[in-house]
Each structure stands twice: as C-alpha cells, then as structure tokens.
Image: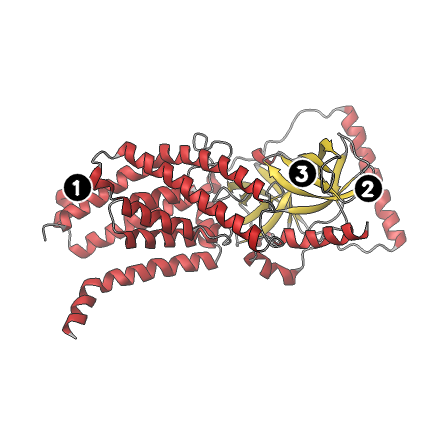
C-alpha cells in the first residue's frame, strides 16, 4: 500500500486523501440518525461528529481543529435545529484538542483518545446546556426548554451516556483514520 | 509582490479547501441536511422491515367496540352535517417507515422514509399504534423529519375526554408527558383518556394522546398529571402520516427555520385560555 502510494502522482494522492477524509465525515453523518443495538444507552447514541473532530484535531494545529469543528457543527445544525448551534461546542472541542498536544506528552494512543473523547463529550454537552440555559434567561417566552431544572437534569443523562458510548466507540473511527493520515504525512515529509 | 505570490502558491489550495468545506457545510445547513437525509434513506430503505400483519383473531369484545365506534362516528358525522359544522376534507393517509432517530440528543425526532412525493407536508400529523406521535417539521422529496410529542419543546393543547377539563402537555421523557391544567381543581383521575383539544392550533381536535397515570393536584402554579402516551414512542417502526387541516400553508415555510413553533402557537392558546378562567 505504502509503495503503491509512493508511485502515485501527488495530485492523485491528494485527491485520494481528501476523498477518504470527506468520505469518513459522510459516514459519520449517516450513522448519526441510526440507533443500532450496542450503540445506544438510555436512547442516547455516540457523538460521532465529536469523535471525528477529536481524531482530526489531535495531531493538527488549533486553527485546523476549529475549522473542522465549525464545518461539522454547521452540518449538524442543518440536520437537527440550528438554535442553539452545535458549531460553538465543536469549534471549542477542535481547538482545545489540538491545544492539548497529546503526542508531545503521551505516546500511547488508544486509552488516551478514549479519555480525551470522554472529557470532550461532557464539555460539549455542557456548552449546549449552557446555551439552552441562556435562552431561558434572555427570552423565556421563546426558549426551547422552559426551566433550568429540566435542562440540567437532561444534561446529566445525555452527557454521561453519550460520553461512555463515544469513548468506547472512538478507537473504531480514530484508528483507521489516524493510520491513513500518518501514512500520507510520512510520504509527504521527505519531499 | 513576489512574497505575496509565494504565499499564495503555498496557501492558496489550503485556503480554497477551507472555503469549499465551509461553503458546503453552510449549504447543507441552509437546506436542512436534505441531501444527507436523501442519501441516508437510499442506504436505509433496503433494511426496512415490512409491517407484520396481525393474524390473531380479534377478541369479540374488541369487535363489538369497533362496530359501535363506527356507528358512533357515522352518527357524529350526520349530526355535524345537520349543524352545518364545516370541516375540511381530511386528505389521504400515508403509511411511512421510521428509518432513523434524531441526529443529536437534545431533540426527540424521528426520520421517516416518505416525503413530499407521497404528499407529506410540514405540519402533517404523525400517529402510531394507539395515538398521535408528533408533527412533521421538515419534508424533503423522499424523507421527512418529525418532532415527537415527547420532546420537551413540543407543547400541545389537550383535554380530558371524560370531563372536558383543558390543559396542555409538555414532553418529559421517552414515554411520559406532563399535563398542566388551566383549572385550579380539575376533574381528573388516573385512567382518564387524554385527547387533543379544539384550542390547539397545530393539531386537529379529538386525537387520542394517552392515559392519565397519576395526578398531583397540589402542584404549583397549576395542577399536574403524568400522562402515559398510548403510542410506543421508543419502538416505532411504522407510522401513519395524515394531512393536517390546521396546517397553514403560508406558515409552513417559516416554520422550518424556527426551532419550535409548537411552543409559541400552543402557548398563546394556553395563556389566552388561562386568562379567561
């Protein structure tokens, strides 16, 4: 595989790289509405877009992470409801994951990714819950949720269930993607 | 000039890609993810199970009740005609498979495998076995998205079938909703049937919603009851979509962009009624 890729012309390699990247995003988007058995806990599934953003940002710059978060956040807004936006939490997740600079401190990959995803899901659901709460405080009449108690009770359930599931499923997405990007980087490096 | 050109050579492609990614994401957002749902349906439709025909012979009691219901319905129609009560012709019902759930956890939605081409419009009423399930909030040519009544944001004006006490329900959890009454001392007890009221602007009156599970009359500011929904919201596989005589075509375009028109519309009803009583 490696040797084959080396002989490819650069533009073809780039296109393949982008096709795989975009394809993986599309795959995540298509898994989102499903609830397969084993991917569901208390009617909550893994947060696939967040796993993708973490996988993308973990070895990239903060700017790249934030752009990826913004892109996927806008798409998820379209697939559900745009208020409150999913883009905000995903932008913060992307930038923060890149900022962690995991590879400088921890070489090991699997468990640390699961841990990062766990923490990031909790953070992202908290940001969403904060946005819902802000709606209640600013304009109680048009807010989606009516009272703060409901929001934070719901937040606990979603954050915990989704964090457990996402961190368990994270390696499934992270491992192949990371391996592919590492290979591409290894080929591009010597030139 | 040279430096600018070198910068452009190095970063031009990257800038273009960022623009392309953000542009397409914005496009998907503005079109409510239509394309993604269409692709999703294409992949999911081969896996949809056919509805199982129940071959169990009917209980004689059920048969008797069904016959009596038909009799009462026809009587009711005749009386309405005598009174000159104008009702818009209800359109055709469409049976639609449930192919997916909400794409995030804060909204209770389902994705159906039928859309505009089968006559489904924004505002159509969706019901499952036993009662109403929700309302279509977005329709693409072949798919539609339904806001379930178990969603904390959907609020519907309802009435107790036996005593005609009014109130509204709001989603609580998967299979329970909370009903708040407008009366201080409503005549309600566990086991009562709850149906949509004629004051709801989003749902036609008289559709079954659920059964009262428990009542808390001391709740402030208004008495509350926990309603168990009659439709199995968590295990829906097939639903029936019927056109809604109350859906206003002029509203439907603006509804799709609003997060949740159910609350506003039904609550204005609620506050009006509450003020009168």
In the image, what residue occupies the spot 56% across and 52% down? A137
Give x and y (percent) for residue A155: 50, 39
Which chain letter matches label 2? Answer: B
Of residues A151 and A15, the one nearer the viewer is A151
Q: Nearer the viewer, mark 1 or mark 2?
A: 2
| Relative to A160, residue B13 above or below | below
Which quadrant does the N terminus of chain B fall into? bottom left
Name the mark on residue B220: none
First in sequence, mark 3 or 2: give its number: 2
Q: Is residue B162 left or right of residue B252?
A: right
Tell whether A19 sits left or right of B2. Answer: right
Query: x and y percent of residue B128 in the render?
Result: 64, 38
- Which of these two is toward me, A94 or B256? A94
Binning the other alpha carbons within 10 Å of mark 1 as few (below 14), some (14 to 19) or many (20 upward) gives: few
For the question of whether residue B203 can be seen, the reply is yes
Residue B51 on image: x %, y %:
58, 34
- Where disc 3 sits, the SS reads strand
Res. B164 image quadrant = top right
Seen at 71% across and 35% down, the residue is: B225
Label 3 and label 2 in one chain: yes
Q: Depth check: give the residue in front, A42 or B85.
A: A42
Mark 3–mark 1 distance (CA, rounded to whole Å):
59 Å
Which chain letter matches label 1? Answer: A
**What is the distance, in whole Å, between disc 3 and disc 2 at their CAs?**
17 Å
Which of the pair B67/B255 is nearer the observer? B255
Which circle marks residue A1 in the picture? 1
The residue wearing badge 2 is B164
Q: Residue B87's x, y, as percent?
A: 79, 54
Is the residue at mark 3 from the same chain as the one at mark 1?
no
Quarter occupied by residue B112 = top right
Q: Which residue is mark 3?
A: B178
Which structural element holds mark 1? loop
């Amino acid at each position: 595989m490696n040797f084959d890729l080396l002989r490819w012309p650069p533009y073809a390699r780039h296109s393949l790289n982008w096709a795989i990247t975009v394809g993986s995003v599309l795959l995540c988007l298509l898994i989102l509405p499903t609830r397969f058995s084993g991917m569901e806990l208390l009617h909550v599934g893994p947060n696939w877009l967040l796993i993708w953003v973490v996988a993308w940002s973990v070895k990239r710059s903060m700017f790249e992470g934030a752009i990826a978060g913004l892109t996927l956040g806008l798409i998820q807004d379209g697939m559900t409801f745009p208020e409150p936006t999913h883009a905000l939490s995903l932008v913060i997740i992307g930038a923060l994951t890149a900022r962690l600079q995991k590879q400088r401190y921890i070489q090991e990959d699997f468990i640390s990714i699961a841990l990062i995803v766990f923490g990031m899901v909790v953070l992202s659901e908290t940001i969403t819950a904060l946005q819902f709460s802000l709606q209640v405080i600013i304009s109680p009449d048009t807010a989606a949720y009516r009272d703060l108690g409901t929001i934070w009770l719901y937040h606990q359930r979603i954050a915990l269930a989704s964090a457990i599931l996402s961190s368990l499923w994270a390696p499934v997405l992270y491992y192949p993607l990371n391996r592919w990007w590492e290979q591409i980087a290894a080929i591009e490096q010597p030139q | 000039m040279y430096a600018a050109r070198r910068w452009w050579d190095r970063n031009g492609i990257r800038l273009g890609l960022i623009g392309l990614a953000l542009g397409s994401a914005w496009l998907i957002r503005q079109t409510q993810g239509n394309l993604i749902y269409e692709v999703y349906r294409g992949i999911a439709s081969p896996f949809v199970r056919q509805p199982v025909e129940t071959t169990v012979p009917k209980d004689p009691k059920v048969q008797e009740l069904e016959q009596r219901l038909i009799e009462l319905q026809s009587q009711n129609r005749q009386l309405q005609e005598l009174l000159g009560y104008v009702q818009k012709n209800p359109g055709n019902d469409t049976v639609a498979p449930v192919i997916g759930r909400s794409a995030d956890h804060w909204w209770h939605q389902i994705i159906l495998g039928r859309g505009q081409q089968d006559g489904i419009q924004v505002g159509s009423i969706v019901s499952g076995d036993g009662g109403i399930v929700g309302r279509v909030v977005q329709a693409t040519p072949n798919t539609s998205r339904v806001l379930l009544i178990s969603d904390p944001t959907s609020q519907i004006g309802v009435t107790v079938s036996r005593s005609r006490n009014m109130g509204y329900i709001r989603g609580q959890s998967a299979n329970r909703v909370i009903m708040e009454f407008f009366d201080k001392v409503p005549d309600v007890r566990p086991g009562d049937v709850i149906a949509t009221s004629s004051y709801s602007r989003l749902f036609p009156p008289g559709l079954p919603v659920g059964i009262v599970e428990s009542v808390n009359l001391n709740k402030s500011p208004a008495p509350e009851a926990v309603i168990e929904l009659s439709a199995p919201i968590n295990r829906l596989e097939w639903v029936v979509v019927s056109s809604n005589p109350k859906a206003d075509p002029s509203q439907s375009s603006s509804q799709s962009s609003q997060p949740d028109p159910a609350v506003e519309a039904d609550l204005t009803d609620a506050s009006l009624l509450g003020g009168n009583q």
